[in-house]
Image (cartoon, coloured by chain):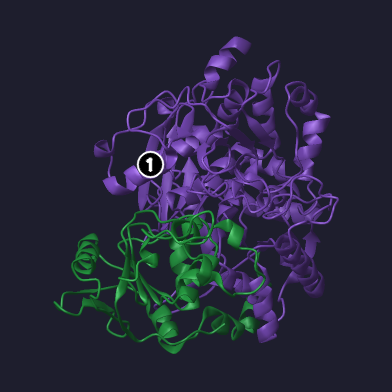
Chain colours: A green, B purple
Amino acid sequence: MAYDKFEILNSTAVPLPIENVDTDQIIPARFLKATERKGFGDNLFRDWRYNGDDTPKSDFVLNNPTYSGKILVGGKNFGSGSSREHAAWAVYDYGFRCVISSFFADIFKGNCLNIGVLPVQVSPEFAAKIFAAIEADPKTEISVNLPEQTVTLVKTGESESFDINGYKKQNMLNGFDDIDYLNNIKSEISEFAKELPL
Amino acid sequence: MSTKKTLFDKVWDSHVVKHVEDGPDVLFIDRHLVHEVTSPVAFLGIKNRKSGVLFPNKTFATADHNTPTINQHLPVADPLSANQLKALEENAKEYGISHWGLGHEKNGIVHVVGPEYGITQPGATIVCGDSHTSTHGAFGAIAFGIGTSEVEMVLSTQCIMQPKPKKMRINVEGELNFGVTPKDVALYIISQLTTSGATGYFVEYAGDVFENMTMEGRMTVCNLSIEMGARGGMIAPDEKTFEYVKGREFTPTGAAWDKAMAYWKTLKTDKGAEFDKELTFSASDIEPMITYGTNPGMGMGISKSIPNAEDLEGGVATYKKSLGYMAFNEGEDMIGKPIDFVFIGSCTNGRIEDFRAFTSIVKGRKKADNVTAWLVPGSHKVESAIKEEGLLDILTEAGFELREPGCSACLAMNDDKVPAGKLAVSTSNRNFEGRQGPGSRTLLASPLVAAAAAVTGKVTDPRELMKELA
């Protein structure tokens, strides 16, 4: 499934300065029972966001109207745990297009790139700066520039570059995915398969 | 550049269809395992793109994540779970994929049945939409979890696109102490590395401890590789591996076996091959482990007390939040804490050796009255062995019941949910907040520690009970 192109995103951000946010928190297993990719945003951070009786927990950041935006800023080791792509779907479906953290778990990061959420890894120092800026002013604007591979605090101009491989960058810029690429080289794959030992 | 290759290099490099410039490798996948939860959207994708399944005989489907563990002969009560199971069955049928659904004699947890039927083989690349696919690395395979987009890629092209990870070797040398199991070895390593210590790496386990370990023990260790952030972990195949694989349903025979063996015997790290990182631990430092927090890295020897935040690396706020969730305090002992639930099962510890270990401690004792125990075999094959070996009689005598196979309370997608606030000793793989049910509190441990808790009703050092037996 192709997704919207990603070039430059200017947005306020939602801060979640907790380390090791695992995929069971992002979307608990009991909400993985759909057979279509629909509605996962409703259950994003379900058990941090809602009480057992489905009333919102007022102290959780997604329930705080002060914070909003298309960027989620998480603590270190964001997305650890399960391979469930539903976690990335939930982030996307809720309305985030970018997650910033000082460290990502591998599979979550890969899943994000495959569905059009840009994972931006920054230094711990810059992550701390972003959290501090949002704390000082919840309307802090952040600019994520994919062509230039930079993330910038708009007000102060403080900026840092981030890594992404050239192939994935082109995919994100064009809204392509790996499936398109692989479907185009099927005959090459079938030839290769003939030579394998197993 | 050195021509010496690691085990990982050998398997990875031989499966690269092509390298994309400034991008990932196109990696060919030998074996694809699918289950009901992470596959439906992938099948929708191949329908929408009209791409079909390129090699249906390389994909194997089993139902495990949301299945009930009692009354499996009855229709599944939860309509959403039933719908997913039906979707898997229909998709498998439509595309000619083998399907071991609920009630099938070969049904069980995907990472338990793969090895049982010889689908898992040395030198193979194996993926599944489940992070504990790393289990199959025990055979010298490259095995790891993938997302649903990648499940679709494998269905339609038998390939995924991934950059080659860095390589780490973890050696554990010496002999394990009394009462220390493969689960303890893994929990110990994770406690030393943290849950992100191996992120970006693929791990090879080496040294005396893994050489001496049974195949099932190796599966437990490789299973938990993901819990330190590693994509996967693997162990070089040896005579034990070949002996295990031989004669299983999907194992090659005759000339194909000879050819496979010739290949498999080359699967070891060359002397002098380089790793990006190498760590060595001493087996004598490891005691039976237990976790006290909300990630698998928050573990310690069972006789120790909960560390103070100031003595640890990492954020104090996150650590205190975690202990707050568990309702534990810094400096407390784990031993003696009353528990409510015991779960033995999962792709980590749901095999016959795990049930033998559990039974060895409960034999001649009784389940504690305050404990609800869920004993869930990893597959029908494990279930049969429990009965045939007489373990079931011992368990029944001690007041335990055996359930039917599935992932069960490891992730609590079915009805096997630990209620809010209750404390469970679990042989599974994750102690995340709410993992075993909303508000549940999980202590990860070995089958021996689980058994000791089940009969005493509290966290107990299993060595105390084992001494009495000896």
Residue B97 appears in the picture as rendered: no
Residue density around tag 1, few if under 14, some if 14–19, many if 20 or more, within 10 Å: few
- x and y, in percent, of residue B51 in the image: 68, 83
For disc 1, the chain is B
- x and y, in percent, of residue B441 in the image: 50, 41
Res. B56 image quadrant: bottom right
Judge by depth and name the residue closer to the eye, A163 or B205: A163
Q: Secondary structure at mark 1?
A: helix
Residue A155 appears in the picture as rendered: yes
Work out whether B246 lies above or below B98. above
Q: Which residue: 39% across, 78% down?
A: B22
Judge by depth and name the residue closer to the eye, B139 or B361: B361
Work out whether B420 lies above or below A21. above
Identified by mark 1, the residue type is Gly
- x and y, in percent, of residue B77 in the image: 77, 56
Work out whether B161 lies above or below A105. below
Res. A165 image quadrant: bottom left
- x and y, in percent, of residue B23 in the image: 42, 76
Q: Which residue: 36% across, 58% down?
A: A59
Q: State left or right for residue B184 relative to residue A152.
A: right
Mark 1, residue position: B324
Q: State left or right for residue A26 relative to residue B371.
A: left
Judge by depth and name the residue closer to the eye, B289 or B259: B289
Quadrant including the N terminus of chain B: bottom left
Work out whether B9 lies above or below A113. above
Quadrant including the C terminus of chain B: top right
